[in-house]
Image (cartoon, rainbow, N blue to C red):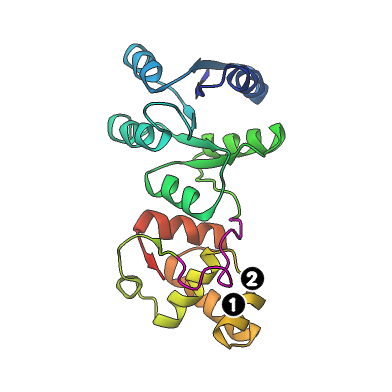
Amino acid sequence: MTRLLVIEDHALVREGLVQTLKLLGAGVEVSDVADFDGANTLLEKESVFDLVLLDLGLPGVDGITCLKSFRQRYPDMPVVILSAYDDVQTIGKAMACGASGFVSKAYSSERLLAVLRDVLAGKVMVPELSPVISFSSEPHPPMLGGESDPSDFGLTGRQAEVLGLMARGKSNRDIAAILGLSEGTVKIHLTAIFKVLGVSSRTQAMVVVARRGIRLG
């Protein structure tokens, strides 16, 4: 039997999620609670769940605080974050705090189920990142990532610049224009970055940045 827990404060949304998750197949049992306190009470009685789907915008104790608590108390229990916001900072913060996956509330039921199947299979799943920050509107864009210097992970200064722009959703063409490089050179930098980080895609690179706390300017 596969046991799932839904933590969502809106009753209609929660009820819809419960019905959707049952489509994962026979032998799926779904429990649901409205908040952190309810989750704690249930977990104290039945601490064995194969996956938790956690709303990021819970009232009272927010989803990130809830996630951190679960990671400390139940380190082997996968937690997938559900959020109406899917910007770089929100995704990065959730993944850095130990989420096993991130699901946007804009997803279809089919896409939600696909993510959960992958997480149940042991994968870490995050969406492609949205280009929500523009350099033209923010001459001094906020820092992304954590506090660790990129050089500590073998990244050059230029590679860190390329990675930072990629984290803001910039395309290869955008990065080339901003840094005064050719697209071919940008691709070479990205290949080198992926090799250093041990990944094969932009999404995987962002997971590594978040989890290792790599500072991006």
The residue at the point 39 percent across, 81 percent down is: 156
Q: Amino acid at mark 2?
A: Ser
Say which of 47 and 133 sits in front: 133
Q: Amino acid at mark 1?
A: Ile
Q: Is residue 64 left or right of residue 21?
A: left
The residue at the point 61 percent across, 82 percent down is: 176
To which residue does mark 2 refer? 171
- Is residue 28 placed above or below 172 in the rendered structure? above
- Secondary structure under badge 2? loop
- Is residue 50 placed above or below 129 in the rendered structure? above
Q: Is residue 118 left or right of residue 61?
A: right
Q: Which residues are magenta?
A: 129-141
Real-space Cα distance between discs 1 and 2? 6 Å
Residue 168 % position (x, y): 54, 64
To which residue does mark 1 refer? 175
Q: Residue furthest top?
A: 45
Q: Is residue 75 left or right of residue 192?
A: left
Residue 109 % position (x, y): 70, 32
